[in-house]
Image: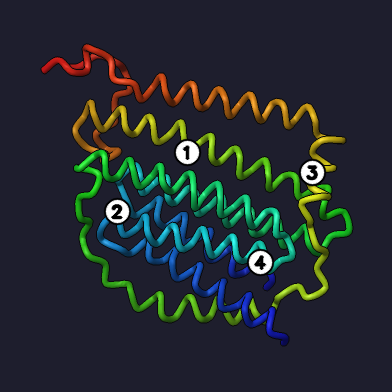
Amino acid sequence: MTYAPAMVLAVVGFLIILRHRQAVLLFMGVELLITAANWMALLAMTTNPSGPHTAIVVVFSIALAAAEATMGLSLVLRFAHRHRTTDVRAFEALNDKEE
Amino acid sequence: MNWLAIFYGATSALTIACGLGVLLSDRPLLSGYFLTGAMVGSGAIFGELHSPMLAGIQILVYGGGVLIMMMFVIMVTPYGNRAQPKSRLWAVTWLLSPVSGILAAISYPSTSRAILGRQLGRQLLLHQGLSLELLAILLLAALAGSLTIAMRRQEDNLP
């Protein structure tokens, strides 16, 4: 019951990934999933006596998510310039040669 | 149920409503605005769970960094702001977010322990020094990598 709202947010993030085909929106879904995971982790940690020690995981998670978003969005930018779209169905081939 | 639990429930409901807004809105830019709301809301939730430092980090990193970057990607690529087919599921928002908010308010952990910045800093510097250094190197590598990837080479400009 405690984790139910965070679970709902995680499901919403997952549905965003399933519904949309635009790369930026897929990243938004991933960020929502990570946020929901952090929420659940924090709920677990605040009720645990060793909470402050394990809360470091959330700090690392936020920093890793930032690094992932930086790399991913720069890839999206690159592909958008190359394929003139941000639809992931156009990014089937990742090789560098143009047809 | 005390006031903090009610605030926690209201913030949870708003955050989930913003998440559903990202899912159901028909324009990526609007989705970006909704995501900003969801991230600020989750930062507020972290604060209500007695973790002010994590709340600050969440709002600064996501609200101030990642989301600005996403908005720029949407705006720099005009084809990234193409309208999606309109969804008819907006009614779900009116049902799901209040129910989640009530669930959150009922299950609010009132006896939770505070996680303060001082404790996090001490833990990071005294016990997780190597992890902190590795994280710094990873962030630097991500910055350099993203610059290298995003830079347009001469052959990209050829017709």
Q: Earlier in the sequence, mark 4 or mark 1?
A: 4
- Give the image quarter of residue A79: top left
Tag of residue B51 = none
Residue B27 appears left or right of A27? left
Residue B62 appears left or right of A17? right
Residue under label 4: A3
Compute the Cα span from label 2 to label 3.
Answer: 37 Å
Residue B65 appears left or right of B23? right
Tag of residue A69 = 1
Label 2 sits on what residue type? Pro
- Residue B29, given in percent of the width and then of the height, sits at 30, 54
Label 3 sits on what residue type? Gly
Judged from the image, the secondary structure of the residue bearing numbered disc 1 is helix
Residue under label 3: B121
Q: Tag 3, which chain? A: B
Nearer to the camera, A5 or B49: B49
Same chain for labels 3 and 1? Say yes or no. Answer: no
Relative to residue A21, is residue B142 depicted above or below?
above
The answer to the question of whether label 3 and label 4 lie on touching residues, with beta carbons closer than 8 A, is no
Relative to residue B98, is residue A79 depicted above or below?
above
- Residue A15, given in percent of the width and then of the height, sits at 42, 57
Nearer to the camera, A49 or A18: A49
- Give the image quarter of residue B127: top right
Residue under label 2: B28
